[in-house]
Image (cartoon, rainbow, N blue to C red):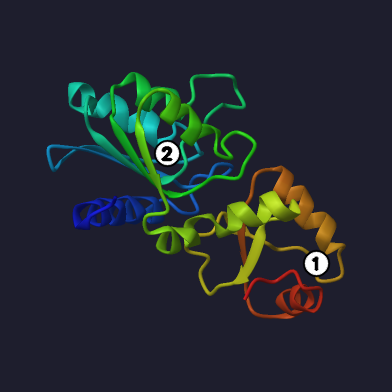
Amino acid sequence: MSGPDDTSFMARAIELATAQMGQTWPNPSVACVIVNGGEVAAEAATAPGGRPHAEEQAVPAAGARARGATAYVTLEPCGARSSGRKSCSHFLAEAGVSRVVVACVDPSPFASGRGVERLRQAGLEVETGLLADQAAVLYEGYLHRLETGRPMVRVSADGEGFDARFAASPKADLVTELKRLGEAGYTRLWTSPGELADALKDQGLLTE
């Protein structure tokens, strides 16, 4: 069962991941905070360009202090990697982490409960859902792309926290344009108020 300290450490992880939003595509921004004896042993977020993952950075940084520690992760650690490399679940288990607290479960083919199951099979205690509502903003575009094949588009004044600007012609086939960008790994796009935003809204492609 999660306590007040768990909430505090997960809030820190969400803060770290939020600071990286818009810099990590084609991967979502994830953070990992490793805590041992009530003190932070290491913390990291997905690097610009999506590699390395948060756990890949935090585990080596924690060193021996990872053993017996609790890892707070904003998104379920991957149970497999598209590249075939060692998964983040493996990194945590092999480092001797004893407990993993996850905010949001990842429905992608490389996680979808596989990360949690792999951790539990390795003997780690796993809890999910802590501060899930607060972490959800980190992954709404990622989940939108998984569900529709398209990145989410919103109107923004400056594009802060977005992957890129969507600058298609309002008369273009916007669904096709967005699917192309989704295939390229984009999850959150922005556009300025105006004709394009109006066209997106008319076609139900604009997220309010």
Mark 1 vs 2, N-terminal side: 2
**The disc label shown at residue 169, or none:** 1
Question: Looking at the picture, which amino acid does disc 1 mark?
Answer: Ser
Amino acid bearing label 2: Ala
Q: Is residue 142 above or below residue 154?
A: above
Under circle 1, the secondary element is loop
Evaluate whether residue 72 shows in this view: yes
Disc 2 marks which residue? 47
Which residue: 23% across, 55% down?
A: 3
Left or right, 23 with reference to 61: right
Residue 144 percent location from the top left of the image: 65, 57
Q: Nearer the viewer, residue 14 or 2?
A: 2
Q: Position of residue 31 (x, y in %)?
A: 37, 44
Residue 41 image label: none
Seen from the viewer's position, the closer of residues 62 and 25 is 62
Label 2: element kind: loop
The one of 68 and 120 positioned closer to us in this rendering: 120
Near-viewer residue (176 or 111): 111
Q: Is residue 150 shown left or right of residue 108?
A: right
